[in-house]
Amino acid sequence: MRNFLKSFINFREKKFRFIVAGAINTTAGLTIYPILYLALTPLGFGYVEILLIAQFICISFSFITNKYFVFKTKKNTRKEYLKFFIFHGFYAILNLIFLPFLVDVMKFSPIISQIIFTIPIIAISYFWHSHITFYNSEK
């Protein structure tokens, strides 16, 4: 058990860094949308418009943490960002479909709906980023 914990909590291990970055990115993502929602709805912004702003901020922030902290790549920033954005952009489009469904049809709060929608992204993103986004840069 000690060896497992020692290897799991090894800061040099990419998987551990991904978990740490994931916690930071998830915290940022779960914080940015509610903050923007509470700040921008009084100004007349709708929850979907706020989602678009939050998604751009969160995707960019997550790219930075993954590129420089997790995968530590040194080249192809534009190419990597495009691959990263394709993955998260796809989920953002799905989010644009399901958020109104959860809010308007299911009557969930926009904040709770966003939390529910974030969970699958976390589960799939390590595979995508380690095998597609940053894969060529690691070789």
Image (cartoon, helix red, strand yellow):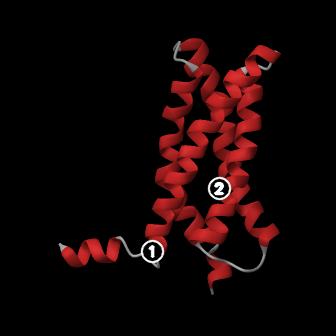
Q: What SS does tag 1 mark?
A: loop
Q: Position of residue 130 (x, y in %)?
A: 56, 70
Marks 1 and 2, how far apart at CA: 18 Å
The residue labelled by disc 2 is 62
Quadrant of the rendering where the C terminus is positioned: bottom right
The residue labelled by disc 1 is 11
Q: What SS does tag 2 mark?
A: helix
Q: Quarter of the image holding residue 38?
A: top right
Mark 1 crowdedness (10 Å alpha carbons): few <14, some 14-19, many ≥20: some
**Amino acid at the residue labelled 2:** Ser
What's the residue at 60%, 69% (across, down)?
Answer: 69
Examine the rendered structure and indicate whether residue 136 appears above or below residue 50.
Answer: below
**Amino acid at the residue labelled 1:** Phe
What's the residue at 60%, 42% (across, down)?
Answer: 29
* Mark carried by residue 38: none
Nearest-to-viewer mark from 1 and 2: 1
Kindly check if marks 1 and 2 are in contact, taking CB atoms under 8 A apart as contact.
no
What's the residue at 71%, 38% (across, down)?
Answer: 54
Question: In the depicted view, which residue is nearer to us: 8 or 52?
Answer: 8
Examine the rendered structure and indicate whether residue 45 appears above or below residue 71.
Answer: above
Examine the rendered structure and indicate whether residue 31 appears above or below residue 2.
Answer: above
Task: Describe residue 5's horizontal placement relative to residue 117 as left or right.
Answer: left
Q: Quarter of the image holding residue 47?
A: top right
Earlier-in-chain disc, 1 versus 2: 1
Outermost residue toward the bottom in this view? 139
Quadrant of the rendering where the N terminus is positioned: bottom left
Task: Describe residue 62's horizontal placement relative to residue 2 as left or right.
Answer: right
Q: Position of residue 117 (x, y in %)?
A: 53, 35
Q: Position of residue 80 (x, y in %)?
A: 73, 68
Residue 60 in view, yes or no: yes
